[in-house]
Image: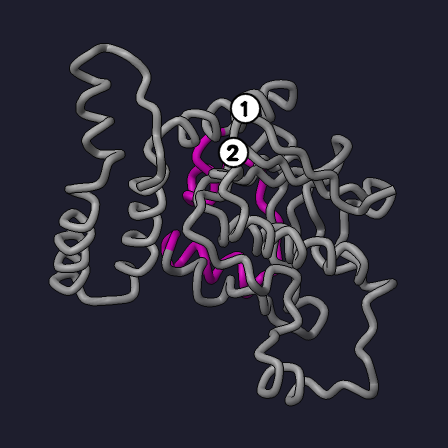
Amino acid sequence: MANLNITVEDKVAVVEFNRPHAMNSIDPEMRQELYAFYDRLKKDDAIHVAVFTGAGDKAFCTGADLKKTMPDPNDSYANQLLARGETGSAFFGLETDKPLICAVNGYALAGGTELVTICDICIASTNAKFGLSEVRRGSIPWGGSLQRLPRSISKSDAMLLLLTGDMVDAHEALRMGLCSKVVAPEELMPTALAIARRIASNAPLAVRAVKQLVTRGMDVPLPHALQMDKYMYGILKDTEDRVEGRKAFAEKRDPVWKMR
């Protein structure tokens, strides 16, 4: 049985963490399956959007399986980080211009919440729980949340989560800005998939340009970010897809995108 269930339909990939017996925690085998999917995601033009969720109704993802994830005594972290450029995070390599959505059912703890901070949109079920508990184990989040979280929610809310290790429920996560919507459990995947399909129906080059500009723009001064917008607008201005989008609108029909 695969640790990840991956299906692709209507240009949307659904990635389901499939270890419900272990609260969908990430063991070494699942980690390698995730890395393989990230590589596929970047190369496969049939995938325009990815949706992450968890099998069962108890957990989305609870981070690393501490019972199975043990450090290799023959592989130093210095070698891992400096020689191979790896961080040890299960989400290493998930940098992509394609939109990512989290459909959070149940517990999203440690790496589960880290994935939420990486994804572009988070939809939560009413039974969702979020938390970064690493400080309670003498460690720190190392999937990027220390830097991403204060950039996406208030510093006070970010520090509350990071320093206490406390869990928050779906409605508190909504207030903080960790998620965009809270829905009943039975509405979670239909809602997430409907959003993913609406995104996938849009001009793919424009969608990827928007994500790239927003992501990169957050790390540069506003005047520089605005300049990047101008350059990207010029790049897209004469593409076949932009001409097709305007033509389809005038003719009251669905556009046919060619990604050029």
Q: Is tag 2's residue or tag 1's residue first in the polypeptide sequence?
A: 2
Note whether 196 is above or below 71 in the view shown. above
Q: Which residues are magenta?
A: 152-181
Instruction: Identify the residue at image location x=12%, y=53%.
Output: 230
Report the label total.
2
Q: Residue furthest top?
A: 252
Secondary structure state at the residue bearing disc 1: strand
Instruction: Identify the residue at image location x=53%, y=26%.
Output: 10
Q: Are marks 2 and 1 in contact (CB under 8 Å)?
A: yes
158 in the magenta segment: yes
Task: Left or right? Give the position of 221 relative to 96.
Answer: left
Please name the residue that numbered disc 1 is placed on: 183
Residue nearest the observer in this picture, 235 or 17: 235
**Image location (x, y in percent) of residue 188:** 59, 25
Residue nearest the observer in this picture, 56 or 78: 78
Local packing at callout 2 (Cα closer than 10 Å; few below 14, some 14-19, many 20+) is: many
**Image location (x, y in percent) of residue 255:** 31, 22
User: As shown in the figure, which amino acid type bears the numbered disc 1?
Assistant: Val
Secondary structure state at the residue bearing disc 2: strand
* Image colouring: one colour
In what quadrant of the picture does the C terminus appear? top left
